[in-house]
Image: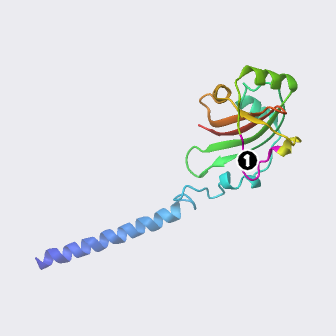
Amino acid sequence: MKKWKKISIITGAIILALIAVIVVVALLIFPKGFWTGQSAMHDTRDQLEQVAWRHDLKPLQSRFDNIKGMEKCYWKADTIGSVDFGPTNYYIKGFIVLDQAGFEKLKDEYSWEKIKNDFPQGLKPEITGFQDFDWAFSQDFSNKVLQNKFGGALYLDLNNGVVYISVENL
């Protein structure tokens, strides 16, 4: 029996040593942040103000082609989570200023429910040049524009014809 006891102690020690080696190798191989789901570069969901404003309409027009009459835009986009492994999701947050015809058509085409909208730090609607906003939401509008490509919501400012986008790709 003493022989078996020695063998089981030695086997246990070898198993523990192998586990320790595997953990050390895994920590060296996988990038910083992999274990917490955070990017080694950055995760901007909480750092929106550090993401630069974009003003190019074409990317928004191609993604949201059901929003007609885009005139100007102010938006931010970045990846969500780790960019080191596998497919990466991204978010888009910002404002689209519609021309008068697009605004009137959108306002008349859907039923809008007025809401109070609190914007995250680094994303203020005053960047559009307007000061007084009257935000409203339409589930039908959000569904039509986002389809099954994005999750999130779209809001319309009934005073100025500004669409607020807060979405993530699916």
In this rendered view, identify the residue nearer to me: 116 or 88.
Answer: 116
Under circle 1, the secondary element is loop
In this rendered view, identify the residue nearer to me: 38 or 116.
Answer: 116
Q: Residue furthest right?
A: 129
Q: Is residue 66 shown left or right of residue 40?
A: right
Which residue is painted at 79% across and 21% down in the image? 105
Q: Position of residue 111 (x, y in %)?
A: 70, 24
Q: Is residue 35 shown left or right of residue 15?
A: right
Which residue is painted at 75% across and 27% down in the image? 67
Count how many numbered circles sit on residues in the image: 1
Q: Position of residue 20 (x, y in %)?
A: 40, 70
- Compared with 98, 39 (above or below) is below
Q: Position of residue 95 (x, y in %)?
A: 78, 39
Residue at the spot of label 1: 119
Q: Amino acid at mark 1?
A: Phe
Check residue 48 for magenta coloring: no
Position of the C terminus, as image quadrant, is top right
Which residue is painted at 82% across and 26% down in the image? 103
Dominant SS of magenta comes to loop
Q: Is residue 130 shown left or right of residue 13?
A: right
Q: Position of residue 63 (x, y in %)?
A: 70, 31
Q: Residue furthest bottom?
A: 2
Check residue 118 for magenta coloring: yes
Position of the N terminus, as image quadrant, is bottom left
For mark 1, does the 10 Å Cα neighbourhood hold few (<14), some (14 to 19), or many (20 or more) residues?
few
- Which stretch is magenta? 116-125
Display colour scheme:
rainbow
- Compared with 97, 4 (above or below) is below
In this rendered view, identify the residue nearer to me: 120 or 89.
Answer: 120
In this rendered view, identify the residue nearer to me: 6 or 137.
Answer: 137
Q: Is residue 2 shown left or right of residue 103?
A: left
